[in-house]
Amino acid sequence: MKQNYLTNNSYLKVLLLSTGLAFANSCVNPDDLDFDRVAETKWNPDMALPLVNSSLTASDIITKGDKDGKIEVAPDKFCTLVYQDELSVKTGAELLFLPDQTMAQQNGNMTPLAVAAFGIAPVGGTASYSYSTVVNFSSGSTPMDSILFDSGSLSFTATSTMLHDASVTFTLISATKNGLPLVVNTVLNAANNYQNTVTIPINGYSFDLTNGGSQTNKIPVKMDVILTKTSSGNLPTTSDKISFTPSMNNLDWKRVHGDMGTFTMSTGIPDTIIFAAFRNSFFTGHIVHADPRVIFEIRNSFGIPLQVDFVSVKGNIPAPNPGAGDFVVTGSGVTTPLNVTAPTLAQIGQQVLSSRTLDKNNSNVRDVINYNPYFFITNINFVANPTGTPPSHNFIIDTSTVKAHVRCELPLYGKASNFEIVKEFDFEFKDTDAVESATLRSIMTNGFPLDLEMQIYFIDAFGNPIDSLVKSTSNRFPVKAGVIDGTGKVVTPTVVTTDNTIEELRWKVISSLAKKIRIKASVSSQPAADDIKIFSDYVLGVQLSARVKLKIELKNK
């Protein structure tokens, strides 16, 4: 807030107007006044004006300038400082790549029955036969039960040794879309030298790769041939055939079922949570948290049971800061792997939650947090099918992922010693020549169960202190904690009022250079007190006002 002081002329006008009104309503005869004598008199009126009227809550104090942490308030108004972050491994589409497929050539020889029928047919007559086979789908080391394709193409390259027109139909009865099988048609004749390649898109087709049973990576193909006699010569035999080679290209999938096996998915770069509050300037002291917790929430949409291995969990203070080093979290909470549930087929596309909480009962996390680290670093791996693939096998979709949400909860419950809170307010005071002295009154209302040592600074435009308000041995004035009841809650705030007089020369320097007022408090819990709790309705009230003594000279002109 900005305060503008009245100029000398402004004040003089107000003063004269007030004086005139007083004369108009009194029995004093103006002729009796000696204006020459009055004009030489120095006037010393007082003026009081507010400078600061504000209040600070736990959120204002703890998370000031901290974009990473936030205060969460429980229904009973108890406050918890929370830091959190989320990391994820590869999505299903990134994890599983399907290569282009070039399958083995298949040979569909003409059957004896078809040869006999074709031999007696007239020119223009037909004979037909069918050939069924199974081709292999290559998926590396991953046996697959089925695939739903998002995009890609299927091609058949066919060649006939029979020098007669052939109409060929390839049917993949296990590849369906909207309930209908995939069908590919082609024609082999003299015009294309009895060979042809036909390609169709397969987006939206689901391929059952079990061959109607318990096999994997199998695609049944049926070829139906209608042969038309174009001449009376070159009659085919059972050695004649139509050969075809299937291929699949540019494959993207939406869903895959199969045996994904046991493998490790790494999160790569360790996750780092920045405890910004511990790096703020006011954290020059120390806080002892009574019950901090670190919660790992794992959300898994892979149809694969997983296991979380805690490779490393630690706090860190980087050099050259005091106490620099790593503070490793140990205990059963991190040495025991976390089993992560997989969604069922009925939950496909959904995330299933599993969690692990590290607290004072299963780890030394309280000790680690109470080093007040700048960073909390976690490095975890995910092991797929840790006990082997289940009998029902696995499934993944292209958007499947596993996410680790790391949440550090620091309940504002514990002890504190000598950490500082800082708050700044705008300040401007003009026309200081008329000020003979200034008395600044501060009223501090402490609704926290914490003892404060206060100081007020005047700050220039560059953030540098010009002067401080309190000039005492300790250079601060104490404000005791609020009065608490039997449950540990503050029921009566402590109010401390102090007056400090600033002489003319100091005030001229302060009022001409200062742009802000900085209020700084060193905060500590009472040494003999139990762990204290901070609630959202606790308030530190700050009021600062100035009473200035003016010197006004009235001269007769």
Image (cartoon, rainbow, N blue to C red):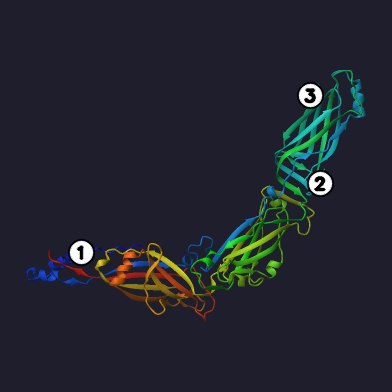
The crowd level at tag 2 (other Cα within 10 Å; few <14, some 14-19, many 20+) is many
Residue receiving disc 1: 14
Question: In which quadrant of the rendered view does residue 318 lie?
Answer: bottom right
The crowd level at tag 3 (other Cα within 10 Å; few <14, some 14-19, many 20+) is few
Question: In which quadrant of the rendered view does residue 120 lie?
Answer: top right
Q: Is mark 2 on a helix, strand or loop?
A: loop
| Mark toward the viewer: 1 or 3 | 3
- Looking at the image, residue 261 lies above or below residue 425: above
**Residue situated in front as seen by the camera: 418 or 117:** 418
Question: In which quadrant of the rendered view does residue 153 lie?
Answer: top right
Residue receiving disc 2: 216
The residue under label 3 is which amino acid type?
Asn
Residue 192 is marked as 3
The residue under label 1 is which amino acid type?
Val
Mark with earlier residue (2, 1): 1
Q: Position of residue 249 (x, y in %)?
A: 73, 38
- Residue 495 in view (yes/no): yes
The crowd level at tag 1 (other Cα within 10 Å; few <14, some 14-19, many 20+) is few
Q: Position of residue 246 (x, y in %)?
A: 79, 36
Mark with earlier residue (1, 3): 1
